[in-house]
Every structure is written in structure tokens, then in C-alpha cells.
Image: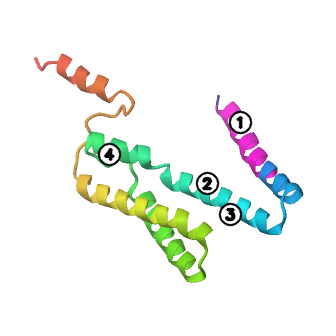
Amino acid sequence: MKIKTGILIGILDVGFFGAALIVSQLALERETRINAIGLMAAGLNIVMYGSPLAAMKTVVMTKSVEYMPFFLSFFFFLNGGIWFFYALLVQDKFLAVPNGTGFLLGLVQLILYAIYRKGKPLQHNIGGLEEGLQHEHLISPS
């Protein structure tokens, strides 16, 4: 399964990059090419910064930061902030929008971390949160 997943990801990564490169070089003119590649890069950057949203939901549901690494949140904040301010200086919207988004999402993660850092996890099975809570009620101390 791991090998199949690795192959699939490799094909998708190389395939997407190759298709973007070929289409932009063969079908688009200079200014349109720059805008198309910039838009794709900005979109992928926003997806990257948005990927921890599921972890943020889990933090709020469990009231614990067990599933959200602090350093990942901190460096999303730091990286997004530095690139955002650089983008403002050079007036590059393709850098400013996604990195400004990353800066704000990183800030929200750090705020959540500050709020829930002392929380204890309700259980270890994220996907079955309700099931785990119900299970706790079924087991009574003897």
C-alpha cells in the first residue's frame, strides 16, 4: 500500500508539474504565462497553508494541542509573515495573497495553541471521537 501510494503521489507530482510546464511553455505568451504560473503557485501555496485546518478543528473539539505541532504552527506564522512583508515591499500580489493568508492562519494556530496548550486529550482516536467518548461511559469502575 505504501509503495502504491508513493508511486501515485510521484506520478501526480511529476505529472502536474510537467503538465504545467509544458502547457505554459507551448500554449501561453510571456505575460499570460507569468500570470498563469503565478496563479497556480499562489493557489498551491494557499492549499499548503490551509492544510492544518483539520488539525485546528481537532484542537477545538478535543481541547488539546496534542495533534497540532507547535513548531509547524510557529514556522507557518514566521514564514508567511516574512514572505508577506517582502511581497509588500516588492509589490508582488502572487506572493502577498497566499503568504498573507499563511501568516493569518499561523497566527490563529498560535492563538489556539495558547488557549488549549494545557488541555488533556479526550482520547487518542481522532476519527472516532464520539465512539471513544461513548466507550468511556460503557466501562464502569469496579
Say which of marks 2 and 3 sits in front.
3
Mark 2 or 3, nearer chain start: 3
Say which of marks 2 and 1 sits in front.
2
Mark 2 or 1, nearer chain start: 1
- Disc 3 and disc 1: Cα gap in Å? 25 Å
Q: Which residue is mark 3?
A: 38
- Disc 2 and disc 1: Cα gap in Å? 18 Å
Say which of marks 3 and 4 sits in front.
3
Q: Nearer the viewer, residue 17 or 98?
A: 98
| Residue type at the position of mark 3 | Gly
Tag of residue 44: 2
Residue 26 located left or right of residue 99: right
Mark 1 or 4, nearer chain start: 1
Tag of residue 8: 1
Residue at (24%, 21%) from the top-left corner?
Answer: 134
Mark 2 residue element: helix
Mark 3 or 1, nearer chain start: 1
- Disc 1 and disc 4: Cα gap in Å? 30 Å
Mark 3 or 4, nearer chain start: 3
Q: Nearer the viewer, residue 104 or 31?
A: 31
- Disc 2 and disc 4: Cα gap in Å? 24 Å
Q: Nearer the viewer, residue 54 or 6?
A: 54
Please tell me in which quadrant of the rendered image residue 71 appears.
bottom left
| Residue type at the position of mark 1 | Leu
Q: Which residue is mark 4?
A: 59
State the extent of the magenta-drawn residues as a range.
Answer: 2-18
Say which of marks 2 and 4 sits in front.
2
**Image quarter (top left, top right, bottom left or bottom right) of the C terminus:** top left
